[in-house]
Image (spheres, rainbow, N blue to C red):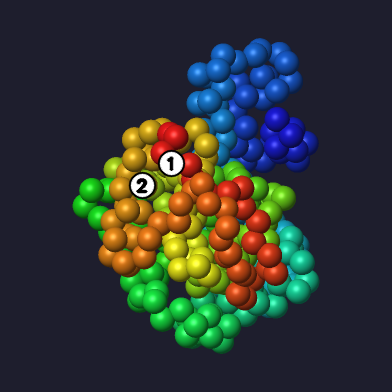
Amino acid sequence: EPLVRAILEMGPRTSPVSRALREHVEGVRPLRPGQLARAEALLRDGLLTFRLGELHRFVEAQHATGFTSEALGPTTLHALQMLRHLRPCHRRSLRRLIHQELAGDRTPHPRNVEWARRHPELDLELWTSDFQDPGAPGVRSVLDPLERLLAGTRVGSCLGIGGAHIENAAALALDVNKRVVYARSPEGHLQARLILGFSEEGTVLLHAPYPESVGQDVRDRLLTWVEAFTDALGVPLHDWEDDGYTLPCIVGPESWRDDGLWRYDED
């Protein structure tokens, strides 16, 4: 509801808020639970386009990005908007990453290189690859670091722009010990996001999929992919009942904040 009200206050433009959802929030015509869920799904689908439109207007007004307009694709625009919300100590690393991506430079950050050196037990090439499993169609690891920045914005979580833990999104893009996985429908629509981490204890950390309302079939596909991935890595999946794990931030924010691990056995 606060998000809908904030968008409505900005005026019509290309607002992703449907008339039905607007009237529900304004108390004019309440929606039934099923109708509300569909309206919220439509809002999520249109939210990224709306935010990018607002960012285009911001960039045109400011003329202070340091990037040419030809380079400002959707993921770059989003990354630039993220810069405005991060703490100053993290902007430099992200700006460096943006410049590298635009230049096609995939040279790893020295801190990531040092972290990998301390963890020879992890097959880094496989960990950072486009691993696929035939038993989990539509589930893929996100390789583009600027797309990983979108991990919160795309699903409307607290890692997105305006969210309480936006600094974590920077860590997803910058740190080699964290991965983002998307599940998509046969038509290519994003269904869920999953975050993995490689702990200092040598286990794979599995955070719960988002949005929380994602269906059981999608959850099953995600879990099938994760089990195949960890088997290929030869690394155990961390027991979700054990909260004694460490997931450091390498290049990104000083501390990683999470809500615990996915209690997949209880789904």
Which residue lies at the image location 67% right of the left edge and 19% below the top edge?
Answer: 23
Disc 1 target residue: 264
| Residue 159 screen position, x and y as percent | 63, 53
Using the image as rendered, state which of residue 64 and residue 42 is in the foreground.
42
Q: Report the residue that reaches farthest toward the left.
A: 134
Point 75% across, 38% down: residue = 6
- Give the side of residue 144 with respect to residue 157, left or right: left
> What residue is drawn where x is 53% and y is 25%?
37
**Which quadrant of the figure has residue 172?**
bottom right
Q: Where is 254 relative to 78, above or below?
A: below
Q: Nearer the viewer, residue 228 or 161?
A: 228
Comparing marks 1 and 2, which lies closer to the viewer?
1
Give the image location of residue 217, x and y in percent: 34, 35
Left/right of residue 75 with respect to residue 139 in the rendered view: right
Q: Position of residue 103 (x, y in %)?
A: 51, 82
Residue type at mark 2? Leu
Callout 2: SS: helix
Residue 53's x, y, as percent? 62, 51
User: Can residue 152 be seen in the rendering of this structure?
Assistant: no
Location of mark 2 (residue):
223
Residue 15 seen by the camera: yes
Q: Residue at x 52, y 40 (%)?
A: 211
Q: Marks 1 and 2: CB-CB under 8 Å?
A: yes
Q: Is residue 144 left or right of residue 260?
A: left
* Above/below status of 85 relative to 4: below
Alpha carbon separation for disc pair 1 and 2 = 8 Å
Task: Pick whichever of labels 1 and 2 is earlier in the sequence.
Answer: 2
Could you tell me which quadrant the C terminus lies in? top left
Question: Which amino acid type is marked by label 1?
Answer: Tyr
